[in-house]
Amino acid sequence: MDNASPLLSHSPWDGRCIWQGRRSSSAEAWAALDGLQRAFPAWAGQAPAQRDAALRELGCVLEGQQEELCELLITEAGKHPRDAQSEVALLGKKISITLEQGRALFPQLPPRPESDPPHTIYRPRGPALIVGPFNFPLHLVHGLVVPALAMGSPVLIKPSERCPAVAAAYYRACIAAGLGEVVALAQGGPEVVAPLLRHPALTTVAAVASRRTGAALSQALAGRPEVLLALELGGVNHALVCADADLQACARDLAMGAWSMSGQRCTATRIAQVPRALCPQLIALLQQAAADWQPQQACGPLIDGESASAFRRAWQQRPAALQLLHGEIHEGEGSNAFQAPLLALVNDGAARQHSLYQEEHFGPALIIDPYEDENEALARMAANPARLAASVFCAERSHFLRLAQALDYGQVNHNRPTAGARSDQPFGGRAASGNGRPAALHAANIFADACVIW
């Protein structure tokens, strides 16, 4: 493929072309990293307060572009207006959290002569490559750009090729804020990334992506251990419903966790462990709740028809041990990116070995897995290969805390959906959901190295 070939963006709502541009050539992307390397010493040499001022200016620019950004998220990323507004609202908050709580965690100012050693300060690593996703094309890219710049590391953004218009708008905001020398943009797919991994100035790669992409990046960087690789690779997120759970509230939160954004969240609820005696009642409540999460009403389409077709194919090939209780899977490929919520039941343990149970499938599906004993459910959750987020629904906080201690997940929620995370806390998963480099509040640690002074 010619790297400089045209790049088109089509709306998942109706398939119409909404943006035209071109893919960055290998030479252009390489030159962008060259430029960031030249800009690095001056940017890193600024006082943290100067960099903070530039980032606050970025926040002001983004605030003035909220309407445009919301419209792009709706049109290009297929967001429901509510979800688009929520994503845009996070941008300013991310800057504030990074420059306040983040600065306190990862200080950069030299120690005072009168203070007692030892001291730890954090020094910027240098030019970083950020590989962004399509499901939160603004928030998750911005959530890495801001801490990188705050710590003094310039960034090259390689956004999802499915959301180039959103990325272009964000890049324009960075330029308007005076950050054009330390932020660069390379549009395109994996073919843009591959040559950059050999660039001698590259110090860091942070990617929010699929496990396949994460494995490819790991292999490509195997000979360069000095390049830090931070991966967030999604999850197969379980919820544990206890015998004393409030089933009405539980059904509401399970539905939201599984079906909001048409299931296109790395923290979406995929599997609910439910006491067998409670299954009939909870299933009935979830079937009612599904009416509130129909596409075009409470959520948008999947990102494109190809993704929707892949999701439907996976469910068409489900084993007999996985019974479909609610929802329809339309035959054929086509370009229709809309998919109504699916609800399924494990009626034989063999279903737990199937890819629909073991792997992340981006789409609106929830699997109910009955259990007889709570320890049985905990064992299933422990066997989950991609442990990003879990939820526990129970009445007693003390019971929840005991269970949370036993659940080896990146985050464990009490009486709330798995979907969602806090920017003022670290965010990352266990096992196959990442590589132990949490982002959100701890993202600054991806782009700077500790130095002990004593």
Image: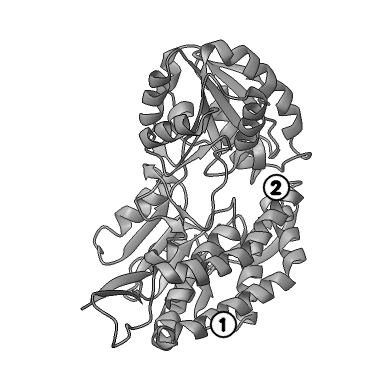
Examine the rendered structure and indicate whether residue 255 appears above or below residue 54. Answer: above
Q: Which mark is residue 12?
A: 2
Q: Earlier in the sequence, mark 2 or mark 1?
A: 2
| Residue 148 visible from this viewpoint | yes
Residue at image point 58% right, 15% down: 279
Query: How far is the residue under mark 2 from the one under mark 1?
Result: 37 Å
266 to the left or right of 171: left
Q: Quadrant of residue 331?
A: top right
How many marks do you count on the picture?
Answer: 2
What colouring style does the render use?
one colour
Q: Position of residue 132 (x, y in %)?
A: 52, 58
- Pointer 1 residue: 53
Q: Nearer the viewer, residue 251 or 167?
A: 251
Q: Residue furthest left?
A: 454
Residue at image point 71% right, 63% down: 69
User: Identity of the amino acid at label 2?
Assistant: Pro
Q: Nearer the viewer, residue 405 or 410?
A: 405
Q: Quadrant of the C terminus?
A: bottom left
106 to the left or right of 10: left
Q: Position of residue 174 (x, y in %)?
A: 60, 76
Q: Position of residue 9 (x, y in %)?
A: 67, 57
| Residue 10 visible from this viewpoint | no
Examine the rendered structure and indicate whether residue 364 appears above or below residue 215. Answer: above
